[in-house]
Image (cartoon, helix red, strand yellow):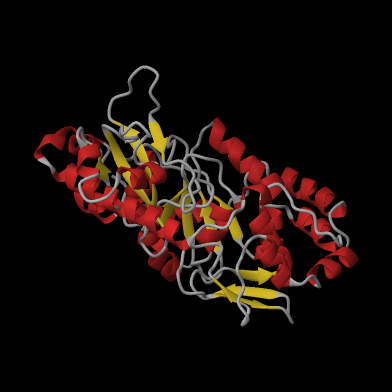
Amino acid sequence: MVRCSSLLVALCLVDTVTPWAPHAAQRWARHSARSANPQDVETARSADIVAVAESFGVDVNSRNKACCPFHDERTPSFTLNPDKGLYKCFGCGAGGDVIKLYRELANATFAEAVEALVKEDRPKTRRVAEVKEVDASERIQLKQANAVAQEVYAEALRHQTSGGARQYLRKRGINPKTAAAFGLGFARPGTARSLTKDMDKSAFVAAGVLYQDGRARFGSKVTFPIRDACGDTLGFGSRALKIRKDEAKYVNSPASAVFSKGSCLFGLDVAKDAIHATDEALLVEGYFDVLALHDAGCANAVGVLGVGVTPRQLETAARFSPSRRVVLALDADAAGDAAVRRLCDDVLPTLADESGVDVVVMRWPDGAKDAADFVAGGGGG
């Protein structure tokens, strides 16, 4: 197994320019030329930031404070400054100007946000139809159901009948202490009955832990809790021990008022302090990549959830780095290369310009297909 000292040597490779970077830079230059003009940008920045927030269902009080739309909280820590057109959340660290706020809430590009904000009627963009006010009690119940499920799954992994799941994790090279730190579990047969002892079935159906008919969504799978920076369980990822016909290898929780695959990161609660200490987040692709890196001493690793890397995930990872630096190290395959090309062409220049996120692309040495393979000795040593 490659240990942290060797991994640090590998991380020195991150300053190597990827083959497609010049193409991305040329494309960005063309993109900048056709993006919003400076006059429109200034007009957009003069928009009433309180009105913009309220148009997305953010309940702003008379002191221009609200519960943050970017993380779950019961006491308002999201502050708006209408005079300066700025916002700041003292709970999760999110902040910026009115253009960035619109982009985050509407899932819009910089140019789309400017165009919408300069129009008097401020038309809604593609994500607004999906934005709805969610009662705080609903969020609390969803998180409570996920917390109960997490405890049941973690206890089940330790049960004598779950030897196959523990053996699978050992085969994947995962240290039991690391598995415990990340809250890994196992949805063994009979899980549904254990879940509903102390909480109504409807709560677990709403959270996506159970199907409507009472079946366990993650039955006979190893579970990976997806937690926010505060450690609250928002949803789950899972991996089947045996792949059956017409069964997916990986299954995630469905979208809910507290969980979205494109917004969450695996391991953030465990890695946030190390990200701050090392001043960079190492963003990789899979659950086992994150676990293997932490086993090897790279405690600043976090992972995406089986979807293309989103701007929200990059910003979330960067939030805990003082210089907002993210090292992106996706799998060394066609899908990983395509994802990086899309990011270099369409996302990273805007993210750096507007959000100050410094993303550096790292490629695994020849012979290693991903982080877990590299740590196991599949390449680079």
Q: Position of residue 156 (x, y in %)?
A: 18, 43
Left or right position of 341 against 274: right
Q: Residue at x 37, y 38 (%)?
A: 373
Tell which residue pokes out farthest to the left in this image.
160
Q: Quadrant of the N terminus?
A: top left
Left or right position of 64 against 253: right
Left or right position of 102 against 167: right
Q: Residue at x 71, y 46 (%)?
A: 126
Mark count: 0
Is residue 151 positioned above or below 342 on the image?
A: below
Left or right position of 103 against 115: left
Q: Position of residue 135 (x, y in %)?
A: 49, 59
Q: Position of residue 99 (x, y in %)?
A: 73, 64
Choose between 237 and 55: the one closer to the eye. Answer: 55
Q: Quadrant of residue 63?
A: bottom right
Is residue 128 positioned above or below 114 on the image?
A: above
Q: Residue at x 37, y 41 (%)?
A: 205
